């Protein structure tokens, strides 16, 4: 079993721009351009899936399952998307994304120096996010 259940965390603003990216030891590390492309691609797929859905009230793709990883997305009411790439079958990712969203609202949005839709540069957010991710790793892997 790998050291971490979570490979990557992305936060995308409502217009599709990557405002936060964190790599948690994925096997194939991405450079900045790759992370920007992936965030843009996910934003586009999410928007297209809302329009193509045969059911009314579709909010887009929430979960993408692949052979080697899963991708789980949470979209806030403001349109900001939080998504994690993680080990296949890891439980409670929705709860983790909601905890990350709470950190975002507490430490980023309440920061008087943060400008909306801009990249996140907040030490308190980074510190508390690391603690939440570490708690999640301990809960999932018993380490």
Image (cartoon, rainbow, N blue to C red):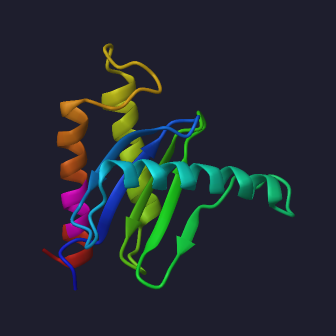
Taking depth in this image into account, of 3 and 118 the one nearest to the observer is: 118
Q: Is residue 27 above or below residue 97?
A: below
Image point 35% across, 20% down: which residue? 114
In magenta, the rendered stretch is: 133-137
Instruction: Judge left or right: residue 95 versus residue 51.
Output: left
- Residue 92: horizontal and vertical position, in percent? 41, 68
Q: Can residue 52 be seen in this snapshot?
A: yes
Looking at the figure, which quarter contains the N terminus?
bottom left
Image point 85% across, 61% down: which residue? 55
Q: Residue furthest left?
A: 143
Q: Quadrant of residue 28?
A: bottom left
Q: Is residue 136 magenta?
A: yes
Task: Tally the marks.
Answer: 0
Q: Quadrant of residue 86?
A: bottom left
- Residue 12: horizontal and vertical position, in percent? 48, 42
- Residue 3: horizontal and vertical position, in percent? 17, 75
Q: Can residue 99 be seen in this snapshot?
A: no
Q: Is residue 40 above or below residue 66?
A: above
Image point 32% across, 48% down: which residue? 32
């Amino acid at each position: 079993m790998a050291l971490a259940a979570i490979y990557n965390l992305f936060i995308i603003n409502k217009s599709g721009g990557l405002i936060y990216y964190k790599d948690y030891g994925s096997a194939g590390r991405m450079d900045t351009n790759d992370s920007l492309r992936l965030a843009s691609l996910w934003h586009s797929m999410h928007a297209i899936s809302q329009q193509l859905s045969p059911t009314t009230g579709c909010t887009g793709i929430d979960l993408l399952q692949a052979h080697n990883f899963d991708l789980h997305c949470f979209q806030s009411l403001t349109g900001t998307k939080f998504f994690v790439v993680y080990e296949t079958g890891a439980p409670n990712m929705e709860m983790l994304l909601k905890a990350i969203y709470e950190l975002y609202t507490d430490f980023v949005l309440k920061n008087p120096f943060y400008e909306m839709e801009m990249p996140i540069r907040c030490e308190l957010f980074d510190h508390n996010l690391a603690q939440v991710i570490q708690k999640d790793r301990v809960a999932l892997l018993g380490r």
